[in-house]
Amino acid sequence: MKLIAKTLFGLEEVLAEEISNLGAVDVQLANRAVLFKGDKSLLYKVNYCARTALSVLMQVAEFRIKSKDDLYNGGARIKWEQFMGPDDTFSIVPSKFTVF
């Protein structure tokens, strides 16, 4: 699965090394973030062990957004019941990489 760990500016390389040492593959630096791939176990491990990660996000979908309708339609196609219950909430954070 595609994952992203957010961090403070200037700590991207430190976080990338931490994540690599924890077993991540395809590690890529980004602005205030590190993109990487791994399984659910790695998601929890990075969330618990990475000292320089502010948060760790799991990608649930990827689609282009040019209008509010694109966002609505893309979000409507996601099988949300796989990730959360009816009383849970979420936020969408647009980035130049993907929507998480």
Image (spheres, helix red, strand yellow):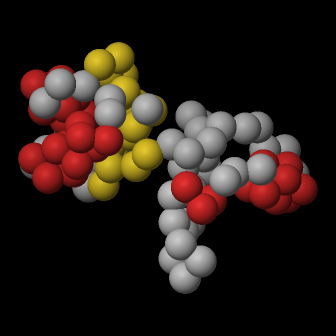
32 to 83, vertically: above or below: above
Asked whether residue 57 appears in the rendered view, the answer is yes
Horizontal side, residue 69 vs residue 32: left or right: right
Instruction: Write the residue at 51% across / 58% down.
Output: 83
Instruction: Write the residue at 85% across / 53% down.
Output: 73
The foreground one among 59 and 8 is 59
Residue 94's x, y, as percent?
Answer: 61, 50
Instruction: Write the residue at 31% across / 41% down.
Output: 40
State which quadrant residue 98 falls in.
top right
Total labels drawn: 0
Residue 81's x, y, as percent?
Answer: 60, 62
73 to 32, vertically: above or below: below
Question: Which quarter of the rendered picture does the N terminus lie within?
Answer: top left
Q: Most extreme residue toward the bottom, as rendered?
A: 87
Q: Most extreme residue toward the top, as rendered?
A: 26
Residue 82's x, y, as percent?
Answer: 55, 55
Horizontal side, residue 50 vs residue 44: left or right: left
74 to 98, vertically: above or below: below
Horizontal side, residue 47 vs residue 56: left or right: left
Asked whether residue 13 appears in the rendered view, the answer is no
Residue 26's x, y, as percent?
Answer: 35, 17
Instruction: Write the residue at 37% across / 27% down.
Output: 37
Horizontal side, residue 33 vs residue 20: left or right: right
